Amino acid sequence: MKGSRPLIPGGYHPYGATYQLKNQKSMKTISIQIISLLILAIGFGNPTVNAQSANELDILVEYMKKEGYDLNKVMERKTWIPGPEDVVENLSDYFIIDIRTGDIAPKNGKPDFEDGHLPGAMNTSFENILKFAKSNNAPDRILVVSCDGQAAAAAAVALRVSGYPNTKVLKFGMSGWNKDFDMWTSALSTDAMKHKNWAKDKAAKTKTFKDSPELKTGKKNGKEILAAQVDAFLAKGFQYGIDPMEVLNNPKDYFVVNQGDEKAYGQYGIMKGAYQFNQPMLQEKANHGSLNNYPTDETIVQYCWTGHAAITTAAWMNLLGYNAKGVKYGVNGLIYDNLKKSQFKKAANLPYVSGK
């Protein structure tokens, strides 16, 4: 009708078309803002919406749970670390990868692998072990050998989460296989027994930390994120072990965890200020630590009986973005004479072959 006001919800408006147009634009702007906020809320509430906006660690953790890569599976106690006597009886069962690349023991001007290795063993480096396994079509029955078992423990973690879940570690390495390569005996020590930083103190009260590591692989799913983390882990070389006395002399420089319960380890005393709990797990389990018991801004150092378990734990935690190390040789390198179990006794006298 001529002269009438534009009709808007609720009837005519006294200010006419100009106000209506402005009001429509305002309503449109508000609607867009509300929709944007809803999208953001949904995205933050569900970290698996897409990998670009999601927390990579959350995606990785869920993937590792699904694939059976929790620590109790990666370090399965009954089969994970056979000793020399067990291996020699079943030598043909293993695809043996020896990762010794230097001239360490005995130091004589040629690589240790050429000095002597297990029959049938092949040689590569820590950094190259996964590529080597793939290029040689390795079956899922790999045995990793290193000088003393410490680097092998870390390398085996990379293999176990990369398609070789039954990878094993030769306990004590070539040091335990034959005395000609023994590095363990010289590593045994009682230096902690009268040290000011070794005491019968109760373990520090367990903390809960809010922050988690931030992964930045840029990958889209759990499988790709894990593969990128494994590649980065291996590329650094073996740097996941730490000297026992370095930690004992400077415990405040590290977040130290006595890796076990009070019954097993506490009877011997602990490093001053150390925490005490079993290995962490993604799926929480009684008497175990969880990832939120560890800080993201400190170097985490754990120790066990022989170093193998602590270094395995450290390797696994590094894949999740933590800065973690294991004390080499464990309490064998700290309070050897006091130990009632899990001592390194002496190297075996098992056969080996020399040459490339």
Image (tube, helix red, strand yellow):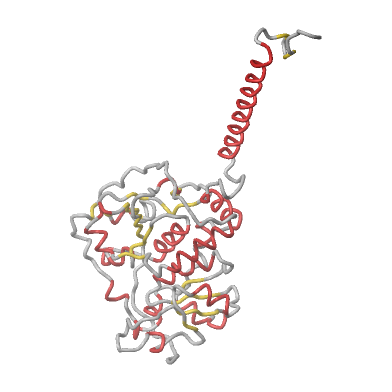
In this rendering, the answer to whether 173 lies above or below 41 is: below
Q: Is residue 140 left or right of residue 247?
A: right
Specify the farthest residue to the bottom: 355
The quadrant of the picture occupied by the N terminus is top right
The quadrant of the picture occupied by the C terminus is bottom left
Q: Residue 279 at x, y = what percent? A: 44, 54
Q: Nearer the viewer, residue 355 or 132?
A: 132
Q: Is residue 119 left or right of residue 14?
A: left
Q: Residue 331 at x, y = what percent? A: 31, 63
Residue 184 occupies which quadrant of the picture?
Answer: bottom left
Specify the farthest residue to the right: 1
Q: Residue 25 at x, y = what percent? A: 64, 24
Question: Residue at (44%, 74%) from the top-left corner?
Answer: 126
Question: Residue at (43%, 73%) from the top-left corner?
Answer: 171
Specify the farthest residue to the front: 2
In this rendering, the answer to whether 128 lies above or below 319 is: below
Question: Residue at (32%, 53%) from the top-left corner?
Answer: 256
Q: Residue 241 at x, y = what percent? A: 35, 65
